[in-house]
């Protein structure tokens, strides 16, 4: 593989982590793991089929929901091979090329999902702040452009102008779709021990990087830049969107209308919390509490971040959205 340029690239492997203390109970641990993937697959495919087959759902909110389902399917497919190997087959050894390829897809689909959540926050912001102009602002053409922006990481944001009403507009700030391509390339230039034991059942960049036996300064710096410019910026813009939404909702005179307006955001808020809460907690542990907390805590948060949102997002939207 081209990304593996160092001389010992073919001589080192990675060992995936099983659930601590349950290594011999594959027949039991495989049941919940397989259930999560089956529910994720069925739920997200169902959402996509419903949106595609019902013309009345060809609206921005549900088109973005189908994009979220596609991102969830991609994220599930990225973690499935190694999880199946560990929990169904008991195979924990993985080659460097396979590991680097998996971490590339895992992080790529994580960033895509984050961008979809930002697009959905913008949709709710426009729907609540500019209800009369909603259909003219979020046209089918613009939704397609936002979908392309999500994949290529063309950044869009809701920006409040200094006008009296605070009109919203789209701002496009380019970011290359190749942001994650350097990650496996840079990892391929590092030196590793012949056998390297990971902390998770799949390969992620911080976990692989900590096992390197050569300097990781460039890798760490670039990884931090990618995270801040994608997931970090998305989180800030989502928060900004909800600040604008909250200002608008609080300005409504009727309590029932306030509740009705805010209720349209509940599903999205749940999706954002499901995605970002484990991510932020995991980042804090990696930065500050790695030595103080047991490995099970880090593994649990990792599973919550990568496995739970694809399973629960369709359920949340099905329960809270009358049309679905």
Image (cartoon, grey):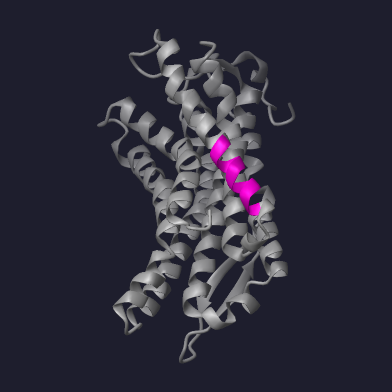
Q: Residue furthest bottom?
A: 164
Q: Is residue 264 left or right of residue 48?
A: left
Q: Main secondary structure of the magenta part?
A: helix
How many numbered callouts? Answer: 0
Residue 185, above or below 161:
above
Residue 200 on image: x %, y %? 45, 26
Vertical comparison of 96 with 150: above or below = above
Residue 215 in view (yes/no): no
The foreground one among 168 and 14 is 168
Question: Residue sitting at 28 percent across and 27 percent down?
Answer: 294
Q: Nearer the viewer, residue 87 or 44?
A: 44
Left or right of 151? Residue 69 is left
Q: Position of residue 81 (x, y in %)?
A: 59, 24
Whether residue 76 is visible? yes
**Residue at the extreme left of the image, as rendered:** 292
Q: Give the quadrant of residue 154.
A: bottom right
- Residue at 64 percent across and 31 percent down: it is 101
Q: Is residue 46 inside the magenta stretch?
A: yes
- What is the magenta range? 42-51
Q: Is residue 69 above or below residue 56?
A: above
The residue depicted at 39 percent of the width and 19 percent of the height is 19
Quarter holding the N terminus?
top right
Relative vertical location of residue 68 with respect to residue 120 in this rendering, above or below: above
Q: Position of residue 318 (x, y in %)?
A: 48, 49
């Amino acid at each position: 593989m081209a990304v593996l340029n160092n001389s010992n690239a073919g001589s080192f492997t990675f060992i995936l982590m099983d659930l601590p203390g349950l290594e011999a109970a594959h027949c039991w641990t495989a049941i919940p793991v397989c259930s999560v993937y089956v529910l994720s697959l069925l739920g997200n495919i169902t959402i996509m089929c419903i949106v595609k087959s019902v013309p009345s759902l060809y609206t921005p909110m549900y088109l973005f929901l189908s994009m979220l389902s596609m991102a969830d399917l991609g994220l599930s497919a990225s973690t499935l091979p190694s999880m199946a190997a560990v929990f169904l087959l008991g195979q924990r050894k993985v080659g460097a090329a396979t590991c680097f390829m998996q971490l590339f897809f895992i992080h790529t689909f994580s960033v895509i999902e984050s961008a979809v959540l930002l697009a959905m926050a913008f949709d709710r912001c426009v729907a609540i702040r500019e209800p009369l102009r909603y259909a003219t602002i979020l046209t089918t053409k613009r939704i397609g452009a936002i979908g392309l922006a999500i994949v290529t990481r063309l950044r869009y944001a809701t920006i409040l102008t200094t006008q009296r009403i605070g009109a919203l507009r789209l701002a496009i700030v380019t970011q290359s779709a190749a942001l994650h391509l350097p990650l496996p390339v840079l990892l391929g230039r590092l030196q590793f021990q012949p056998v390297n034991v990971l902390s998770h059942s799949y390969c992620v960049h911080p976990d692989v990087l900590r096992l390197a036996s050569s300097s990781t300064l460039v890798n760490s710096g670039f990884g931090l830049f990618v995270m801040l410019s994608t997931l970090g910026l998305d989180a800030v813009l989502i928060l900004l969107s909800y600040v604008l939404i909250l200002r608008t909702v609080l300005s409504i005179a009727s309590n029932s209308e306030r509740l009705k307006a805010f209720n349209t955001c509940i599903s999205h808020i749940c999706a954002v919390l499901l995605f970002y809460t484990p991510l932020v907690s995991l980042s804090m542990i990696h930065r500050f509490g790695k030595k103080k907390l047991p490995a099970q805590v880090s593994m649990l948060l990792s599973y919550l971040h990568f496995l739970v949102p694809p399973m629960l997002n369709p359920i949340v939207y099905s329960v809270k959205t009358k049309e679905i």
